[in-house]
Amino acid sequence: MRRILATSTLLTSLVLPAAALASTPADDASAPTPIRVSSGVTQPVLVNSAYLDIPAGYSIDAIPDDAQVGLSLTVNEKGEPENIQVTKSYGKFWDARVISTVRQFKFKPATVDDQPTAVDMNLTINIAR
């Protein structure tokens, strides 16, 4: 199998004020609701990425220079990506491989008041030769 480097760009969302969400009491029976990165919230930091595997026999020349897959995901309190959704497709073949690769990523989790918290984020994966 060949490997190509998948690079990523974190696109932080500044939609919801963190202070309002951080002060909302949580019900023990309800699942934690991910928040968006804004003032008062530290963003998740990628600490471990992975390589995108290319099946043997697949021509690397078939990958254009501008290949990108956009994702929406949640980084949970443990720094693990979950609820991964494709927002910009490059085709089912690449989308599936990118999602599989991103599941292996490890983040330093976002925090509110120095406590790890789940956050929603957008991620663009650039597929390079």
Image (spheres, rainbow, N blue to C red):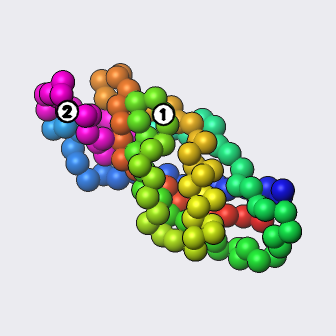
Q: Quadrant of residue 57?
A: bottom right
Q: Does residue 24 appear to the left or right of 129 in the view shown?
A: left
Q: Earlier in the sequence, mark 2 or mark 1?
A: 2
Counting from the top left corner in percent of width and height, residue 7 is at 64, 55
Counting from the top left corner in percent of width and height, residue 17 is at 21, 44
Residue under circle 2? Answer: 30
The front one of 25 and 84 is: 84
Figure check: 60 above or below 77:
below
Q: Are marks 2 and 1 in contact (CB under 8 Å)?
A: no
Give the structural element (helix, strand or loop) at label 1: loop
For the magenta stretch, what is the residue range? Answer: 22-43
> How many residues crowd mark 2 within 10 Å: few (<14), some (14–19), many (20+)?
few
Q: Quadrant of the C terminus?
A: bottom right
- Numbered disc in front, either 2 or 1: 2
Q: Does residue 107 appear to the left or right of 119 in the view shown?
A: right
- Residue 89 marker: none
Q: How many marks?
A: 2
Q: Residue at x 41, y 36 (%)?
A: 76
> How many residues crowd mark 1 within 10 Å: few (<14), some (14–19), many (20+)?
many
Residue under circle 1? Answer: 79
Q: Amino acid at mark 2?
A: Ser
Q: Amino acid at mark 1?
A: Gly
Q: Residue at x 76, y 61 (%)?
A: 54
Q: Quadrant of the N terminus?
A: bottom right
Q: Is residue 97 visible?
A: yes
Counting from the top left corner in percent of width and height, residue 3 is at 79, 55
